[in-house]
Image (tube, rainbow, N blue to C red):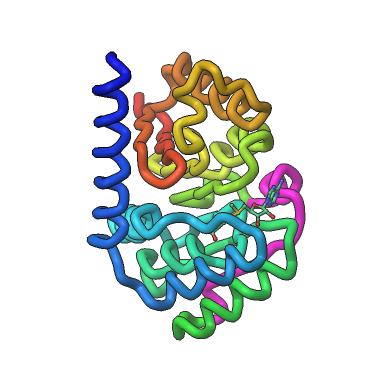
Amino acid sequence: MSAESEGRLSRENAGDLTFSEQYNGPDPLLDAARALSHENGLAPVSQTTAATLTLLARVLSPVAAVEVGTGAGTATLALLRGMPTAGILTSIDTNSTAQAAARDLIDMAGIRHSRLRLMNGRAEDVLQRLAPSAYDMVFIDSEPTNLERMIEPALRLLDTHGLLVIHQTLLKGGVADPVDRSPRTQAARGMLNRLAGQDRLERVLLPIGQGLLLLQKTQR
Ligand SMILES: C[S@@+](CC[C@H](N)C(=O)[O-])C[C@H]1O[C@@H](n2cnc3c(N)ncnc32)[C@H](O)[C@@H]1O
């Protein structure tokens, strides 16, 4: 591809992203959550990612779901909005200050307190304590260097038709750029490569937000 067509492509992509963010909004509560996240030095999911999570949750209708990386609650709110009113989301993070902000956000959204179960700790440890095959959806938005250690524990939680959704898998063009060999990029790239070789999993990688990977156990 020529430099000129690459330049045009990236301009068009940037235009598409901005248009989609506006088209999929506005959402005052999510916008406020995102602003709060940035103030706390956390990167919230984009409006398009949030809308996608809400729609996926609505289609799957999970009565029990797990989130890794509560942050200040942007994706937490998106997931709870899509889940049925009886659905309970267990959300894990090491950052209790951010989780307190997420709790306030969910209260502000008028969502019943008991629908969000916050667990404070390292996901690698907490996931092991949750019941196997008891969840319909797991969403992971954590540091890419930790992702790979979370995949098997997350798959263990899912029932037969459950969906694992992983964010931060493309890293704003980093993974696709062979010159980018930073530890985060290498970790995400290595994970994608290893998963691509596994026929026990159905997968689709979507260039939404920082890259959204959807995985489901292959039905035999
Ligand atoms: C990008 S932020 C999540 C943003 C959130 N999804 C949102 O939309 O607001 C990533 C979060 O993962 C948490 N985190 C990173 N490593 C973790 C780990 N090993 N276990 C649990 N949480 C972790 C961080 O504390 C941070 O709050």
Mark yes or no: residue 76 visible.
Answer: yes
Query: Is residue 128 rendered magenta in the image?
Result: yes
- Image check: 125 left or right of 28? right
**Viewer-nearest residue: 18 or 126:** 18
**Viewer-nearest residue: 44 or 148:** 44
Q: Is residue 214 above or below residue 23?
A: above
- Image check: 205 left or right of 198? left
Q: Residue at x 56, y 55 (%)?
A: 43
Query: Is residue 85 rendered magenta in the image?
Result: no
Q: Position of residue 127 (x, y in %)?
A: 67, 47
Q: Position of residue 133 (x, y in %)?
A: 53, 45
- Image check: 185 left or right of 108? right
Instruction: Please tell me in which quadrant of the rendered image residue 54 appears.
Output: bottom left
Q: Is residue 139 above or below residue 188?
A: below
Residue segment shown in magenta: 113-130
Q: Quadrant of the C terminus?
A: top left
Q: Residue at x 54, y 23 (%)?
A: 189
How many marks the image carries: the answer is: 0
Instruction: Please tell me in which quadrant of the rendered image residue 165 appears.
Output: top left
Q: Residue at x 59, y 45 (%)?
A: 132
Q: Residue at x 32, y 19 (%)?
A: 3
Q: Position of residue 155 (x, y in %)?
A: 54, 37
Mark yes or no: residue 60 visible.
Answer: no
Q: Quadrant of the N terminus?
A: top left
Q: Residue pushed farthest front?
A: 4
**Viewer-nearest residue: 134 or 153:** 153
Q: Position of residue 150 (x, y in %)?
A: 64, 38
Q: Is residue 120 above or below residue 16?
A: below
